[in-house]
Amino acid sequence: MYNAPARRALDIRPIVHGLSLLCLLALAGPAFAEEAQPQTQPQTQPEYTWVHAPAPEGPVSVRLQVDPGEQLIPGLHAKKVKVVVRNHSEDQAVVIRGLKWWEGGLESLNWYGPIQGASAQAEKGEIEVSLNRTAQSLTSLSFEKGLLLPGDQITVIMPFTPQRYPNNMFTVDYVAVGGEGEDWADLVLIEGPPPAYMGSVFVRPNQDALQQRKGRGGLGLLRNTMDPGEADPMVKGSHFDIPIPIAKEYDTALTGGLTRMEAAGRAGATIEEMNHMGYYLPKMQTWFFIRGDGDARYLRLEDGKWVFDFMINMPAFTPELFGRGEAKTPILLNPDVFGGIVEVNTPSQGMYYDPGITMLDAEELWQVLQLAGKKKGALLDAVVIDPNGLDRQWILTLAVRVDASGRWEHPPVEIRQAPDDPSE
């Protein structure tokens, strides 16, 4: 918890209306060398090219894909960003195990593991796997959801908040098989032509199966990891410095009337060399700046004035989970601390384990964060949990500690029986 100085309010209205553009440029100084001066004209979308990892180069390359109707603005969450991942090797198959913006950032999960359905192995000269997708259970085998054969590619939605200018780092964690005398086709199983019954058959790659695949990455199996208990393969990581088409001209009303650099200056944050990450949440009318060590501060528009103060420590990427600036924020809250200001959910046990997620709108989240800053020892964290074996998920915790399954370790709570009627 910070020993926060007195809140400082800056009335921006006379400044906005009284200063000329020349004065604004003089005040901004070096800021406009990094972030383009905002205007009102939309930017022209560039041609997106394939980016390869620096030497030693791996088999994976990536390409950015941004919706033509979306601008990439420093500090503002971009929803319609996609990344195309391609296996450009000729003698290796690749499976994706993780994707993320920024090294150490929020990772795209659930690329490997059981899926809904029932699986069974059949021996027909070689291993053949049958998959019944209608079964209300988890498969006994672990599937790869990002299998890329040589030349395959897959497009993944990867929303993020642009930070670095002009390039942002993107990381692909993967496993590669084949090469060096090994035939990759002997090491993987892919979905064959549709069978007569409800389900799928996975076979060694053959002409019919490859033709059906059409170069699209997706569901498949690695022979050496599909059975539980098999040794984990070596996961490698490639880092890509992707040119980001940051908007050269945009309306700063989208970011509260301030660029990220201007807001950082008012909050006493440093953007250079990524000392602070900056996020603007429109519904909260608040800029958040977080340093790698958890130092957090905010700049909030209240009654026409920008108010700055320090905030509870948090991981640098936490605002990526703050409802994306629009939707409600899922979080696990200590009822003893926050039950007096919001309705706090606690865990329940029904068909599946419910970790007790509370959904907060923008104003409720702000009230919770403000109270947390006054509570000694309250910890805001972003963790990965898997409550029911179906999938892993990122979740915020505040004054709550949970295990990998999302079961509360602190504070101790009584597990409720989930009602038969969800509306109860």
Image: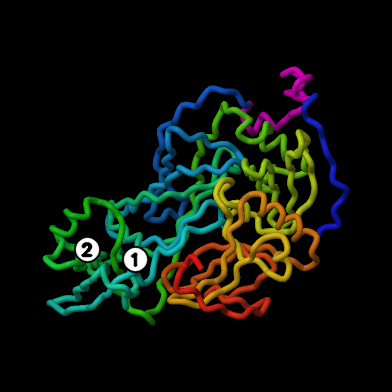
Asked if residue 396 is among those painted magenta in the image, a careful observer would answer: no
Q: Which mark is residue 238?
A: none
Which quarter of the image is occupied by the N terminus? bottom right
Please state the extent of the stretch shown in magenta in the rendering: 15-37
> In the drawing, does residue 328 fall left or right of residue 297?
left
Asked if residue 20 is among those painted magenta in the image, a careful observer would answer: yes
Residue beneath disc 1:
144
Where 25 falls versus 84 (above or below)?
above
Query: Percent from the top left, x then y, of residue 216?
Result: 27, 52
Identify the residue shown where x is 69% and y is 58%.
314
Q: Quadrant of residue 384?
A: bottom right
Identify the residue shown where x is 46% and y is 26%.
44
Q: Are marks 1 and 2 in contact (CB under 8 Å)?
A: no
Q: Quadrant of residue 338?
A: bottom right
> In the drawing, does residue 311 fall left or right of residue 384?
right
Query: Percent from the top left, x then y, of residue 331?
Result: 60, 62
- Amino acid beneath label 1: Glu
> In the drawing, does residue 164 fall left or right of residue 96?
right
Label 2 Cα neighbours within 10 Å, binned few <14 / some 14-19 / many ≥20 = many
- Amino acid beneath label 2: Glu
Q: Give whichever of 104, 24 is nearer the camera.
A: 24
Tell which circle, 1 or 2, labels the residue nearer the N-terminal end: 1
Residue beneath disc 2:
191
Distance Cα–Cα, label 1 vs label 2: 12 Å
Q: Give whichever of 233, 2 is nearer the camera.
A: 2
Label 1 Cα neighbours within 10 Å, binned few <14 / some 14-19 / many ≥20 = many
